[in-house]
Image (spheres, grey):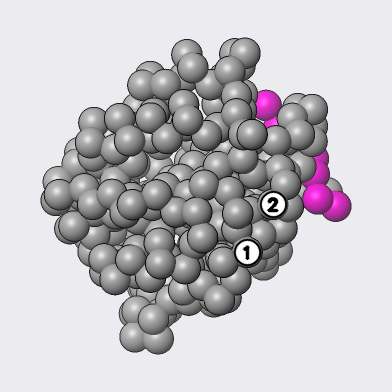
Amino acid sequence: MATVTVNGGQQVHFVDYGGDGPAVVLLHSFLMDVDMWEPQVEAFGADHRLIAIDERGHGGTPAEADFDYWDVARDSFGVLDHLGIERAAVVGTSQGGFIGLRMALLEPERVTALAVLGTSAEPEAEGTAAVYRQLIGAWSETGPEPLVDGVATFCLGEYDASSWKAKWRQRSGEDFRRIMETLVSRDSVLERVGEIQAPVLVLHGSADSEYPMARAESLVAALPNAEPLVTVVNGAHFLSLSHASDVNPHLKEFLAAHAAGK
């Protein structure tokens, strides 16, 4: 584990698993951290140089001011610069997918391939954003304890989230407000993803509680070099963790074909 200062003074915590294979950046979901990627490190860490990044306001990376996902995309490139890595594939789940899409738009020549899981290129639906802002208030007023079970079920389905709930209980109301406001106020990139020329793999769970399958279908339709949509039967929203055994073969095959770039 290491910490580097990037992007005008932002500290970023990351784990470089090393190795001689093509570099792959791993970007976690909302409320998660680098530990989310343990199943993928085990599954294909020997084939690639995996770099897992704690995004702003998550894990060991602070968020001392409001930010957006474009900022986090720049942070991620800053980590690659620090490591002397010019090009990398990117894998992101949910929030990590928001960031991965923005990385591919900011510096397309540096992203060799992109895999996104349980994500969307569109802004948060107005009704959903209103509910999430109510959640901000509840978290601040009552603390996380009454909420963590529902959040775990919503994001991870039947997966045992005990260790994650313990982490969430440590979050202050202000920390939660900052990262949730970033999520609900994000801009749309659906109109721009046609600019992404890298190969893209989109995976989506049929039981995703956050985004309907139509969002994944719209994303695939808008991408010029998308693989066929992979539907994970009964897959939860954070499916790279909850349904790792289902998604890992698809990720491994895709990265073997495209992570090194042309």
Using the image, determine if residue 251 lies above or below residue 235: above
Image spot of residue 242 (x, y percent): 25, 41
Position in image of residue 159 (x %, y %): 19, 41
Residue position for label 1:
195
Q: Which residue is mark 2?
A: 108
Please identify the quarter of the rendering in which residue 209 is found: bottom left
Residue 213 coordinates in the image, percent (x, y): 26, 66
Residue at 60% from the left image edge and 54% from the top image edge? 197
- The amino acid at mark 2 is Pro
Residue 188 lies in the magenta stretch: no
Of 168 and 80, the residue lying toward us:
80
Choose top left, top right, bottom left or bottom right for residue 2: top right
Residue type at numbered disc 1: Glu
Badge 2 marks a residue whose secondary structure is helix
Tell me if mark 2 has few (under 14), some (14-19) or many (20+) residues whose alpha carbon lies within 10 angstroms of its own: some
Q: Quadrant of the C terminus?
A: top right
Q: Residue at x 40, y 62 (%)?
A: 220
Q: From the viewer's perspective, is residue 6 above or below residue 94?
A: above
Question: Which numbered tag is attached to residue 8?
Answer: none
Quadrant showing the N terminus: top right
Tags 2 and 1 in contact by the CB under 8 Å rule?
yes
Which label's residue is closer to the chain start, 2 or 1? 2
Q: Nearer the viewer, residue 16 or 48?
A: 48
First to last magenta residue range: 1-8
For numbered disc 1, what is the local secondary structure? helix
Report the side of 114 relative to 164 (left or right).
right
Picture coordinates of residue 127, whole percent (x, y): 34, 85
Q: CA distance from mark 2 to mark 1?
A: 9 Å
